Image: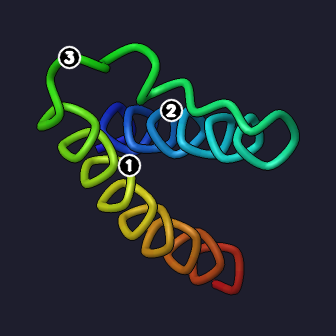
Amino acid sequence: METFQKVTLIFTIIGAINWGLIGFFDFNLVESLFTEASVLPTIIYAIVGICGLINIGVLFTHFDEHEK
């Protein structure tokens, strides 16, 4: 399970970097990499969103482990 959590964390970090690029430089890396195929950015955004939700669960699990 630890490998799965690391993969989801990597996707979440990639999403955060993309949002940082959008906020600071008005540059969307995902859209610029996949300009011709309009379905791929949507899939990538969905994967990053799901990974973010999974990481919320990991965060609370991590807190529960430290309380014991």
- For the point 74% across and 34% down, which residue is it? 21
> In which quadrant of the rendered view does residue 64 lie?
bottom right
- Residue pointed to by mark 3: 36
Give residue 48's mark.
1
Q: Quadrant of the C terminus?
A: bottom right
> In which quadrant of the rendered view does residue 27 lie?
top right
Left or right of 46, for residue 19: right
Q: Residues within 10 Å of mark 1 (few under 14, many from 20)?
A: many
Nearer the N terminus, badge 1 or badge 2? 2
Q: Quadrant of the N terminus?
A: top left
Q: CA distance from mark 1 to mark 3?
A: 20 Å
- For the point 36% across and 64% down, which residue is it? 54
Q: Position of residue 61 (x, y in %)?
A: 49, 75
Q: Residue furthest right?
A: 24
- Residue pointed to by mark 2: 10
Q: How is the image coloured?
A: rainbow
Left or right of 58, for residue 37: left
Please tell me whether mark 3 sits on a helix, a strand or a loop.
Answer: loop
Q: CA distance from mark 1 to mark 2?
A: 9 Å
Q: Is residue 53 above or below residue 25?
A: below
Query: Looking at numbered disc 3 in the image, what kind of residue is underneath it?
Result: Glu
Circle nearer the viewer, 1 or 3: 3
Nearer the N terminus, badge 2 or badge 3? 2
Query: Looking at numbered disc 1 in the image, what kind of residue is underneath it?
Result: Val
Nearer to me, 32 or 67: 32
Nearer to me, 5 or 17: 17
Q: Is residue 17 above or below residue 62?
A: above
Query: Looking at numbered disc 2 in the image, what kind of residue is underneath it?
Result: Ile
> In which quadrant of the rendered view does residue 67 lie?
bottom right
Q: Position of residue 16 (x, y in %)?
A: 65, 45
Circle nearer the viewer, 2 or 3: 3
- For the point 28% across and 36% down, which residue is it? 41
